[in-house]
Amino acid sequence: MTKNGKPAMTGREKSELLWGWLFILPTVIGLIILNIIPIIQTIYQSFFKTGDFRKGNIFVGIENYSKVFGDAEVWQSLINTLKYAIVEVPFSIVIALVLAVLLNRKMKGRSVYRTIIFLPMVAAPAAVAMVWRWLFNSDFGLINNVFHVHVKWVSDPKIAVFAVAVIGVWSILGYNMVLFLSGLQEIPGDYYEAAQIDGATGIKSFFHITIPLLSPTIFFVLVTRVIGALQVFDLMYMVMDKSNPALDKTQSLVYLFYKYAFINKNMGYGATIVVLLLVITMIVTVFQMIGQKKWVFYN
Amino acid sequence: MKFKKLTALCLAGAMVLSTVACGGGGSDSGNSDGGDGDSGSSEGGELSISIWDTNQEPGINEILADFTEETGIKTKLTVVKWDEYWTMLEAGAQGGSLPDVFWMHSNESERYMSNDMLLDLTDKIADSDLIDPANYPEDIWGLYTHEDKYYAVPKDVDTIALWYNKTMFDEAKLDYPTADWTWDDMFEAAKKLTKEDGSQYGLALRNDNNQAGYYNMIYDNGGFVIDDDKTKSGWDDPKTIEAMEQVEEFIKAGVMPSMETMSENGEDVLFQSGKVAMVLQGSWMLAAYRDNEYTAENCDCVELPKSATTDRRVSIYNGLGWAASANGSNTENAWKLIEYLGSEAAQKKQAELGVTMSAYTGTSDAWADSADFNLEAYLNMMDDMVIRPYSKSTVTWENEDNEILKDVYTGDKSMKDACKEMADQMNEKLAEE
């Protein structure tokens, strides 16, 4: 048997293989039922003009796709989504990183600070959005009243998407920080001691020791945050009313999907929009995977 | 790690809170069926009921308690906000898990009826001693009839009236609005009630306030939104455009808060917080204005203005229906509940509790006494009613209309162009039905 080039499996290997599969089976089943099958169904649906309550679907080929590509609303929503991501991702990462480094030292009340920063993560996103909706309110909101300004934070088309992104940064900060903290604790203290002896300042060791050694964690956070930001929906949905004049310039692709699929009951068109989002997300992620070779260090 | 423990503690705390909240809800419904639990349990599970209006929740709960007392059938009421309500119902319909009994609205009824999602009530109504179709407005039956079969029992009717802030009228030394007002009178008053510093506006009429707002003006003026066959839009009818151009005048004259302000706060909130002097609102808003201290003290309502040219005063009206799931596990009990809710006694109680006006003829008079406002106005508006324009895809074209109107409010489009655009998109969607 060994002559065929492939070594035969020993009994032990066989049993390990069996048990290995058995252990990942629950996850695999969950993934297939909850993710893979719906993805296939969504792609399938995007080729149909769907009937009421998923009855009487009519096959329309690529008609939905040609409509999506010609739909200015879809492209505007894509731009909105990208604008949101461009604000949310870098700010949430940089601020969380700085906070993580500051809170990684021995200090008084450390866990209190950590908990406070993590709290938004525990609060229901809908509740968070409702609170911010009142903070941002242009007539009665706290922000405008405290600073005696009259900025239409969430109804001026020019700034609304950024105001929403601020909420996004605030609510994800704690989660990113926890991931960075766990990454920081993996870095051995010897490096810093050695650097200190060589005369490196705190800032220098941050850029030359912390960042390179933390880069796998930063990369992980970056990839997941980009994907998360491209899927933003709840903030726009909760903060902005349907009659909001800034909605056109703020709604994300997922919001548009929701509008078509669940309000206008046009599942097929909605499905097409999310397939577009899926493709864009995959392209962005592939580029990040290629790019990581340049700056991520695995030791 | 201390930190982990703390987080876990917070999470656990949140969970405990939510279970306590659920338990509270459960014991509430437990109280309502009191002592006769043993007779009820043999009937099998409780009926699930879904509605969307929190203002009506307390009143409906009271009526449901009466029902449980009479029949021993337990009920559980869930309130879901309007937008999510239809998403929930849609998902329930697809997955075969609709609530046993729920509210139906003219915007959506046609889709649900034509797809056999609702329980056919025709024979049951024919056999019933309590429900006689002649006792309810014919148009409302029309909303819930498909191919000559009944799919819901009318719950209520709603009409529209003009709400105004008495204090602001006093301050500006203006006479209160009367039933003889025309739309022009309202406009003139709105101008005088608007303060230049933006602290007070005469009127709020949002781009999506169709039923309580500009639809009334359109029909007053002899225009229409949809023709009787539901095949053609009336947005490009000259009379419709004429009426809508009056709305454009309101916008241009600056008697209303900016679009941004109205979208962030809503007409009702602006009215309740003393920012605007007049709003057009449906009778379903009563509970909100009655329970708000400011409006209860300072505000009142009056019949809608009429058109100066045609002298007509229309109220767009609508009525919800109680419907049941076609494939529910407990359709017998569901029907019993619907029959009870449509009966004269329950309809009367609904009016007395001030929940809404009731659909059953003659039961609404009690409603007018349920609060210290001039609620007679709403009853008087029943003299000339037009049913809220609807078709199978109402939601789709109505939302698009609202989108287009936004541009008129922000000044990017003239009302005339917007009306043409609305007619085009609506005709397109009607052709697809």
Image: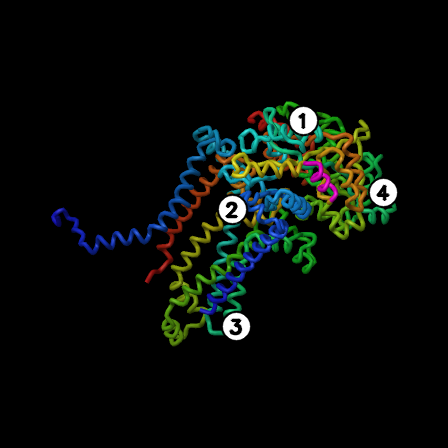
The three-letter amino acid code for the residue at tag 2 is: Thr
Identify the residue under disc 4.
B176
Pointer 4 and pointer 1: residues touching (CB < 8 Å)? Answer: no
Front label number (3 vs 4): 4
- What kind of residue is marked 1? Gly
Give the image location of residue B45, x and y in percent: 54, 45
Looking at the rendering, the stretch of residues picked out in magenta corresponds to: B343-352
Mark 4 or mark 1: which comes first in sequence?
A: 4
Q: Which residue is mark 2?
A: A81
Badge 3 and badge 4 both on one subunit: no
B15 up-or-down from B247: above or below: below
Q: Are marks 3 and 2 in contact (CB under 8 Å)?
A: no
Q: Say left or right for B2 vs B150.
A: left
- Residue B178 location, x and y as percent? 84, 38
Report the predominant secondary structure element of the magenta stretch. Answer: helix
> Which element type, helix, strand or loop, lies under badge 3?
loop
Label 1: how many Cα within 10 Å (few below 14, some 14–19, many 20+)? many
Q: Secondary structure at mark 4?
A: loop
* Spatial CA span between label 3 and label 4: 62 Å
Name the kind of residue labelled 3 in the image.
Gly
Observer-side mark, 2 or 4, equals 4
In primary-sequence order, the first of circles 3 and 2 is 2
Residue A109's disc is 3
Residue at the spot x=43%, y=29% of the render?
A: A61
CA distance separating discs 4 and 1: 34 Å
